[in-house]
Image (cartoon, rainbow, N blue to C red):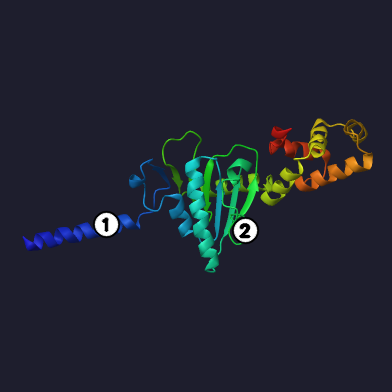
């Protein structure tokens, strides 16, 4: 009897070792119940394993924002201990305002703002990704397929390059609190000529063009058309 039990145990041990040697599932649907999630599949778990890069897009969902705040706090502690990695966070202005004031510090993360709606995405080391589509009531999808993760990384970086640095956005947002600046931006978007716009605003042509140059510089564009387009993408006209 004892010999039979020993053989059974050896078979079980062998089966466990064989199972552990198999590649991890490439796609894992996560449960909304945290107790039933795959080990290491939560946002904080994945970031804890990161060695080089963390890319994250914010949907604005309160649950995600709370997790990201915790994540950034952990990364800040790691940076202070000398274990810094590249962290990029992309989101709307309203979502980024929910993060700690120190979140965009050089030793924590680079923040950029976009006016485009985003799905929740976390990409770690171009190796694993955590996705959650708008309206998804589950815990999201864990992706370990390297080809898919590379595509997700490329999509993120495309949106990243088309976005605006958060410090520049804050400066521009403060500048647009004045009626004159808001008037210049509105006429820039409408495609008005400098002479007509300056006359409508009661400004000299030189002063108007100085305002235009400041707005274009803040938006990181070189043409008036691109400035109007970028302003629309960032939803800067909501306040006009």
Viewer-proximal residue among 81 and 54:
81
Which disc number belongs to residue 105? Answer: 2
How far across and down, in percent of the image, does residue 103 sit? 58, 54
Q: Image quadrant of residue 198?
A: top right
- Left or right relative to 86: residue 207: right
Find residue 202 and report its image quarter.
top right
Between the C-alphas of marks 1 and 2, the distance is 45 Å
Q: Residue at x 80, y 44 (%)?
A: 215
Image location of residue 31, percent across then percent down:
37, 41
- The x, y position of residue 3, in whole percent, is 9, 63
Residue under the point 76% across and 44% down: 175
Front residue of this view, candidates 43 and 12: 43
Secondary structure beneath disc 2? Answer: loop
Q: Quadrant of the C terminus?
A: top right
Relative height, residue 146 to residue 187 (above, below): below
The answer to whether residue 65 is left or right of residue 227 is left
Q: Which residue is mark 1?
A: 16
Callout 2 crowding tier (Cα within 10 Å): few <14, some 14–19, many ≥20: few
Specify whether 162 is left or right of 47: right
């Amino acid at each position: 009897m004892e010999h039979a039990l020993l053989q059974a145990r050896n078979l079980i041990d062998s089966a466990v070792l064989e199972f552990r040697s198999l590649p991890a599932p490439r796609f894992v649907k996560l449960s909304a119940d945290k107790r039933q999630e795959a080990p290491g599949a939560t946002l904080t778990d994945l970031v804890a394993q990161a060695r080089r890069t963390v890319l994250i897009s914010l949907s604005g969902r309160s649950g995600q924002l709370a997790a990201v705040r915790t994540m950034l706090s952990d990364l800040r502690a790691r940076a202070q201990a000398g274990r810094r990695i590249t962290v990029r966070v992309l989101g709307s202005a309203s979502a980024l305002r929910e993060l700690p004031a120190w979140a965009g510090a050089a030793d924590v993360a680079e923040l950029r703002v976009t006016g485009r709606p985003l799905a929740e995405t976390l990409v770690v080391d171009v190796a694993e990704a955590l996705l959650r589509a708008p309206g998804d009531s589950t815990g999201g999808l864990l992706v370990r397929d390297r080809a898919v993760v590379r595509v997700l990384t490329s999509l993120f970086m495309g949106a990243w390059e088309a976005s605006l640095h958060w410090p520049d956005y804050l400066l521009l947002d403060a500048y647009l609190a004045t009626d004159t600046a808001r008037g210049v931006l509105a006429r820039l978007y409408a495609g008005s000529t400098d002479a007509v716009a300056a006359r409508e605003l009661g400004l000299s042509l030189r002063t108007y063009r100085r305002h235009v140059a400041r707005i274009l510089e803040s938006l990181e564009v070189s043409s008036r058309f691109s400035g109007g387009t970028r302003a629309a993408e960032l939803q800067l006209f909501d306040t006009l």
